[in-house]
Image (cartoon, coloured by chain):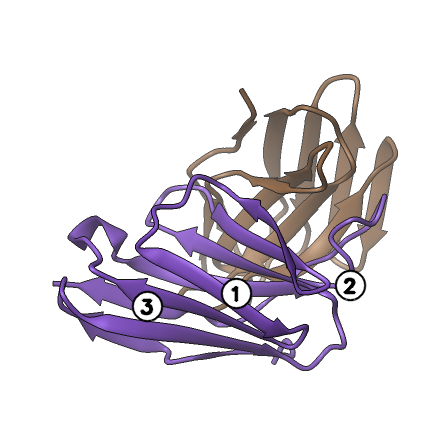
């Protein structure tokens, strides 16, 4: 138990569906992250929020839309996804993304997404 | 571009020692992390190095050479539960973590 929870753990959706992934952290952190993890590929950073402000958007397609209502919650809204978007989506949190040193990230268990 | 290289897979024997290497080329450097990820689970933090040298933490040690862009994770007295993927990540000039693809470690009895 890392203090970061994600729901749902598994999701199967069609290309025309709209769904949302939820992440919650109970660590009092100020930064939250969405990553995509595909088999045998490096973790891909998608979005970063620091003190509720989006600081990074790494050229992610608009069919992925993040939302961060407060420092403890992070959502990833999905619509009109493609089969190649099937992957493990990981949420993480850290104390402060802008710290000059040591910024350990704590990960949730992930949502296994399958797009049909 | 930014790049992190680590072996795709390694095999070792229970009770032995294994060294997992990581080389990196990044724009800036604010530290190097090692994470462990068991299949189907979240990555969990193992170590952080920002200065050259060896950091020891129980059975696990991590080494860094900034001039060589090189790190290794050393696992001693291997146990079956150490079978997992080991991820190397570098914090760049913007404090973003740049990740390697991970090394799958298989432990045999």
Residue B64: percent from the left, percent from the top? 78, 32
Residue A93: percent from the left, percent from the top? 65, 65
| Crowdedness near tag 1: few (<14), some (14–19) or many (≥20) residues, C-alpha within 10 Å | many
Residue under the point 13% across and 65% down: A16
The mark found on residue A91 in the picture is: 1
Pinpoint the chain carrying mark 2.
A
Q: Colour of chain B?
A: brown
Residue under the point 67% across and 23% down: B27
Disc 1 from disc 3: Cα separation: 12 Å
The mark found on residue A95 in the picture is: 2
Seen in the picture, residue A111 relative to B32 is either above or below; the reply is below
Residue placed most toward the observer, A64 or A113: A64
Side (left or right) of A10 relative to B96: left
Identify the residue under disc 3. A112
Residue placed most toward the observer, A29 or B4: A29
Mark 3 secondary-structure assignment: strand
Report the chain shown in purple: A
């Amino acid at each position: 138990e890392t203090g970061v929870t994600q729901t749902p753990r598994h999701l199967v959706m069609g290309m025309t569906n709209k769904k949302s992934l939820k992440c919650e952290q109970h660590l009092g952190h100020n930064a939250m992250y969405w990553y995509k993890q595909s088999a045998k590929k490096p973790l891909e950073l998608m979005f970063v929020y620091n003190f509720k402000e989006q600081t990074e958007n790494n050229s992610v397609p608009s069919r992925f839309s993040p939302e961060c209502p407060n420092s403890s919650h992070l959502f990833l809204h999905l619509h009109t996804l493609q089969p190649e978007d099937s992957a493990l989506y990981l949420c993480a949190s850290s104390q402060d993304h802008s710290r000059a040193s040591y910024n350990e990230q704590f990960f949730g268990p992930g949502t296994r997404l399958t797009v049909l | 571009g930014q790049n992190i290289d680590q072996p795709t897979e390694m095999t070792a024997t229970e009770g032995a020692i294994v060294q997992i290497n990581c080389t990196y080329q990044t724009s800036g450097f604010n530290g190097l992390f090692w994470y462990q990820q068991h299949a189907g689970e979240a990555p969990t933090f193992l170590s952080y190095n920002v200065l050259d040298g060896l950091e020891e933490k129980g059975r696990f040690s991590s080494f860094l050479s900034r001039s060589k862009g090189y790190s290794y994770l050393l696992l001693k007295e291997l146990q079956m539960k150490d079978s997992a993927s080991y991820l190397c990540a570098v914090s760049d000039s913007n404090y973003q973590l740049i990740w390697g693809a991970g090394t799958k470690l298989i432990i045999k009895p």
